[in-house]
Structures are given as C-alpha cells and as structure tokens.
Amino acid sequence: MNFQQLRFLNEIVRRNLKISDAATALYTSQPAISKQIKQLEEELGVQIFLRNGKRITAITEPGKGLLAIAQRMLNDAENFKQYAQEFQSKDTGHLTIATTHTQARYALPPVVKQFMARYPRVKLGLHQGTPTQVAEQVLQGDADICIATESLSLYGGLVTLPCYEWNHCVITPPDHPLLKEKEMTLAKLAQYPIITYDFAFSGRTKINEAFEKAGLNPEIALTAIDADVIKTYVELGLGIGILAEIAFIPERDRHLCMIKADHLFKPSTTRIAIRKNEYLRGYTYDFIELFAPHLTCQVVAHAMRASGTPEN
C-alpha cells in the first residue's frame, strides 16, 4: 500500500466513480489507476469497488470504511507538510476562502484589506457559491475555510463557529405605499410581490418560517442569489425586496428606501467553518479573528481540539 494508491482511491470517489475523470485530474492514465486499485484490493484482500466489466459502478461497504481511513491519512500527510512550512515561512503561503456573494461583497472587504496589509506575501483567494457548494469545497480541500449563513452546521466533517447575527430588511422604491405605514407587519408585506434570496441563501428559511407561522402565503415574484440583483429589480418596480440589512448601503442605494424588519423575521447567524483534522497556519487564525473578533486563536484552537484536530 502506498499514498499514490490512496490518492487514486480518493479521486475516483470524488469524480463520481469515473476513472477517466480521476486520471485527468491526477495527470495519469486510466489503465495506471485501474492497475493500482486492483493491486490495493489484492494486497488488502478486500473488494473496494463493484464493477460492470471495466466500469466501476459502486463502492462496497468495506470500501467506504477504507476510503474514510485513506482520507484521514491523506489529510494527515498534508498537515505534516503544512507543519513544516509553518516554521520555514510563517508569513508566506495561500489562503482560500469559500463564501457566498453577500459575505464577499458586503462583509469581507474590510477584513480582506486588513489581512492583505498584514500578510502581503500570502496569496488570498475568494471562491463564491451556495452555502452547500462552499461547504463541499472545504470538505474536499479546495478551500481552507468557508463563510455562510445557511447549511454549514449540517456537515459533520466541519468545525463550525458562529460569527455574528444579522437581520433582514425591506427595500422599496422611494414612492412605495409601504413607506407611509406607521407600523410594518407581515400581512402588509404580503400584499405586494416579493423579491428575495434563493432558498439556499442568506437566511431565506427565516423569511419562509415567519410567513408560514403567520398563515400567509406571499407571492414570491423573483428569487436571486445576489443582493445586487434583488435591488436592481426592486428599482424596476417589480416588487418589494427582502434582503440582509448589511447589503443595503444608503449612500450607494440612493434610488431605494429601507424599512427595518428585525421585528418581523428572526435574526440569522453567519458561521465560519473549517474541515476537521485540518492543520491551520497562523495567518488563518488571524483571518478568522479579523472577521469575528470573538473567535480568538484560543477559542478556535479549543474548538479544533474538541473535534480531534491538530493545532499549530
């Protein structure tokens, strides 16, 4: 058994059991991967994959257990290298953040600016996607940390920490009748078409829960993953918008008006997540603390220890 065989095993599963795709990703040939996996099965005396001819159709139950061990071994090998690099160059490296549009556009810019000033030799990358996508990127090792509001706590392979709470607000064109209301209610909002986030984004579940609890079924005229898109269509008069309050910037959104709605919808919590058993560079701890000051190195390290993760 060798690490190359473990990498082949892991990549085949990552590529939905397509050996050709795994070969392309690892810059090798399909026959080479097939041969190595066969040798691994013979050495262990366990069938890892079910096959139909030369095509892999499924992973066996013993194969699933071996895959989990292989992934831990590969991750430990990467942590081994990261640990050595930490002492070679503490202020040099890469940090990839996977996050949603709202976080990348409205919450992260001041943090990124401070981080880049503090660590000019660290190459920072921002990947945007749905909460599910950003969680998967961290689990697969394509990103170091992820930041989102929905879904992160559902992944057992992640260490998830709360960053901050935020509220939704209502936005309208400047001449909208809602602006004349002295008291805003869900029933009054439900009289108009609503433009808001796609179901997977930015606390959308809290919006749905509030209307359902009130026995209301508002018309959702349009959904989007991008707060700027929501604002654009509200400006066009296609409906009222419900979005994260952080996404409304008065000096920029001069053609819109904002109505506070923290009494209508429960607050949402933005979370940061790291893969379990991940070795964190010192600057990663610093980035987390810049984004959420209460998440100090000690707090994060304690959470990582509780999950069985090695510290730096």
Image (tube, rainbow, N blue to C red):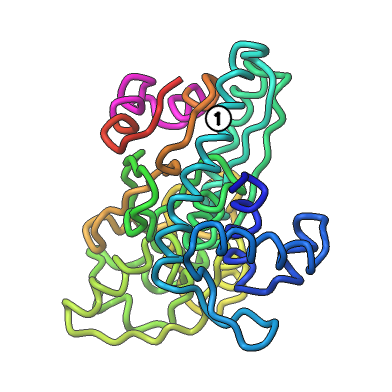
Q: In the image, what residue occupies the spot 30% across and 38% down?
A: 307
Relative to 230, 263 lies left or right: left
Residue 236 seen in the current view = yes
Which range of residues does the magenta coloring cover? 286-302
Q: In the image, what residue occupies the spot 43% across and 65% down?
A: 64
* Label 1 SS: helix
Q: How far across and how far down the image is residue 277, in percent?
A: 42, 38
Q: In terms of depth relative to the viewer, which is nearer, 308 or 66?
A: 66
Q: How far across and how far down the image is residue 207, in percent?
A: 32, 69
Q: In terms of depth relative to the viewer, which is nearer, 197 or 185?
A: 197
Tell me the amino acid under the disc marked 1: Val
Query: Label 1 belongs to which residue?
Result: 111
Verify whether residue 119 appears in magenta. no
Relative to 304, 182 lies left or right: left
Q: In the image, what residue occupies the spot 38% across and 20% down?
A: 297
Residue 160: quadrant of the picture = top left
